[in-house]
Structure formats: structure tokens, C-alpha cells
Amino acid sequence: MHILFFTDNFPPESNAPASRTYEHAMRWVRAGHAVTIVTCAPNFPQGKVYEGYRNRLWQNEYMDGIRVVRVWSYMAPNAGYARRIVDYLSFMVMAMLAAPFLPRPDVIVGTSPQFFTLVAAWWASLLKRRPWVLELRDIWPESLRAVGAGDRGIVLSALQKLEMFLYRRADRIVAVTNSFKRILVDRGVPAGKIAVVTNGVDLSRFAPQPKDDVLLRELELGGKFVVGYIGTHGMAHGLDTLLDAASALSVDPSQSHVVFLFVGDGARREELQAQASLRGLTNTRFLGPVPKREVARYWSLLDLSVIHLRRTELFATTIPSKLFECMGMGIPVALGVRGEALEILDRHASGEGFMPEDAGALVELITSLSRDRESLRRYRANGIAAAPYYDRETLAHAMLEELAIAAGDQRQG
């Protein structure tokens, strides 16, 4: 089977969409299938081309057997609203223009969160007369409103009409959460064409390991209780809550051993770092983005991982992919996300939840767990035991089965 996949994020970018697509595609190639990825030059989240790449009209490379076609796009940082929409639209247009020059596949996939990429996949399906699968990673554009980036009523209404058009036109939909499936069914999308394939963890890379001695010395974390946030520092993540918790703990002498480690990049990283400096917080460490191959070394430093999203009804339908990486690494989780993610955490007893945007609740949780080594040991063991249920190998196969169903339906029809 030849799979043509449209995504505006792909390695060496290391965010969740890029990782999921690459880790699935790599396994599909190993299983004997051909995969062509249509994407842009890597630039997320700063909107600057990564070293070794150029923003050309057309670039062709191979990555672990995956053919990667990169097209030109207007690049903007992952902040604000108008420039990001132009960014999305430019990739859509260039991907649509590239479609006639690509081989005819058996099935086409377009992945969200933003839906302009999906328009390119739909267009390619018309052009190639092949079925297409919509991979739903986010209820977009509603998520724009949730972070205060999409309050323009006319624009949001138009995007929502586009959203429903794409749901109807897709031959099959693969959602990453059961909550997303329920939302679509409530909106009138037939349940029979929606499958759920959650995010997961590559257990070959994210496995239990001792704290990295070199990093402990470099970051002066020896003997510290390290509370960490690793990932995108974006508008959706509400990381002010972590700074408020760090501020409260900094004035408690009994918690002088607690240090907050922030690793990653995003629209709000510089602002958060400036706030920490302005507050005089000596119990925070900010690092920029690190290569994907190095991420596990930084995860190993954490005694407790904080996963947090802003308190909105929409975000209660999401499952942050880093939850599964924590399970694979055996890192206890403090989860500031309601809904399906919390259900998973509670089901496997691999950490504790707290109310999103409640710094006081986070302080209480950190204070309690920093003294409760037995609970931490139990959460580690439970996370490691649960991780195989979310093994990327199994999930890549499940996704492949959905693509085969779409391709098979087309051939039979």
C-alpha cells in the first residue's frame, strides 16, 4: 500500500504531531508499505528554518525509508493569530500545487490540528481519485477560542463551516481520543466512520533509566527534588500556574530542595523566563529545545512531571501525549488536565491530578509527594506497567488497519 500523508509538522521538529506521524510512518515502511510525507521546512515553534534546511519551493529527502517532500511556506512563530493563519494557508496552497506531481497512492491522510492541511489532503483525494482519511488531533478551530486567539466571530464561523465540510467529505476519520469521537457524533458525523487510535510512546526510546549524571552536574540538580515541564511553552499550557507554584515554594524553607525545570520552546517561553527573573526565583531552570534523541536524558532528571493545560471545557477532551512518555520512563505525574487524560492517570494509578490553573493545589501536591517516597515508587512502577498498553508499535498497526479499510472500501466501490 502507498500512503500519501499531509502534515505541516515533521522531524526534525519534535512536537507531538511530528513525533506521531514519524513514528507511525517509520513502522509502516518497515511493514513493507510506501509512505510519502508532504510537509514544509522545519520551523516550529519559532517560525525560523532549522539549520541544514532552506525554505525552498520543493525539497526531496528520505528519512528511515520515508520519502519526505518539503514545500515552501510562509513561516511565523507559534504566537498570535493573523500571521499563523497566513502560515497555514501558504502551506495548504503549496501542498495543493505539489499534489499533481506526486505519485498516485492507495490512500491519502491529512492530519490536524489546523484544518488547512486537511483541505490539501481532500484536494489531493479529488485529483488522484483516491480515498482520504482525516486524522483528528484537536477540535480546531474551537481550540483557538479556548486560548483566546480566535475571538473574531465571522472568521471563526467560517472555519467551523470548513471543519464540518471536511468531516463530511472524509472517507474515514481517526480521532486521537474517545472524547473527540463523541463530539463528532453529537455533531451528526456517522459513528461508523470514526475510529480512535490514541497517542502513545515509543518504548524503544522512552524507558526507565537512572538520572543522567552529566546533566545533574551541569544543571546543579544533585540532591534536588526536580519538578519538570518538558514540551511546548504555548498559550494553551497555562505555565504561569507553575511559576506561581514555584514562587510559593521559594519562600518555604522546608521546600528549598524543590527545583522546577522547564525544557522546550514556544510562544511564551521568553515571557515566562522573564517573569521568573523578575520575581527573583532561584528555584527555576529554563532550557531551550533539545534534540528529540536527547529528550529522554532530560526526562530522566525528573522526580515529578507536571502536565498542564488551561482550564477550559475543550481541553478536558484532550490527552497530552507526554503522559504516555512519562509512563514509559516511569516518572510520576502531577496532572493539571481534566477529563479523559485524568481517567487514564487514575486507571493506571501513575500519578495524581490537580485542578488546572490552581497553583495552591499544585503546591500542596508537590509538598506532599516530595516527602512521600513510597507513593512516588508506586506511581513509577504503575506507569511502567501501564506503558505497554500505549506502545507506539501496536498503535501504528491499528492506524494502518484503518488506512487499509479506507483503501479497501475504495477499491471495492
Image (tube, helix red, strand yellow):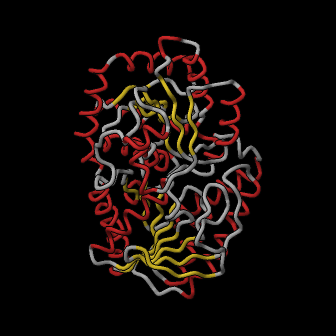
Q: Quadrant of the N terminus?
A: bottom left
Name which residue lies at 66% across and 46% down.
267
- State the image coordinates of residue 105 (x, y, percent, origin top left): 43, 82
Q: Which of 373 and 105 is in front in this view?
A: 373
Residue 21 higher or lower than 181, as above or below: below
Front one among 374 and 110:
374
Q: Quarter of the image holding residue 117? A: bottom right
Of all residues, the one furthest to the top in this rendering is: 253
**In the displayed structure, does residue 382 sit left or right of residue 116?**
left
Q: Which image quarter is the C terminus in?
A: bottom left
Residue 62 vertical position relative to residue 48 in the rendered view, above or below: below
Q: Is residue 361 left or right of residue 233?
A: left
Residue 359: x and y, percent? 56, 21
Between 184 and 66, the one lying in front of the other is 66
Q: Residue at x 53, y 66 (%)?
A: 7
* Residue 9: % across, % down: 54, 63
Name the residue located 52 percent from the left edge and 30 percent from the top edge. Answer: 260
Q: Is 72 situated left or right of 302 in this image?
A: right
Q: Can you say whether 156 is above or below 236 in the image?
A: below
The number of numbered badges drawn on the structure is 0
Residue 320 in picture, x, y percent from top left: 46, 43
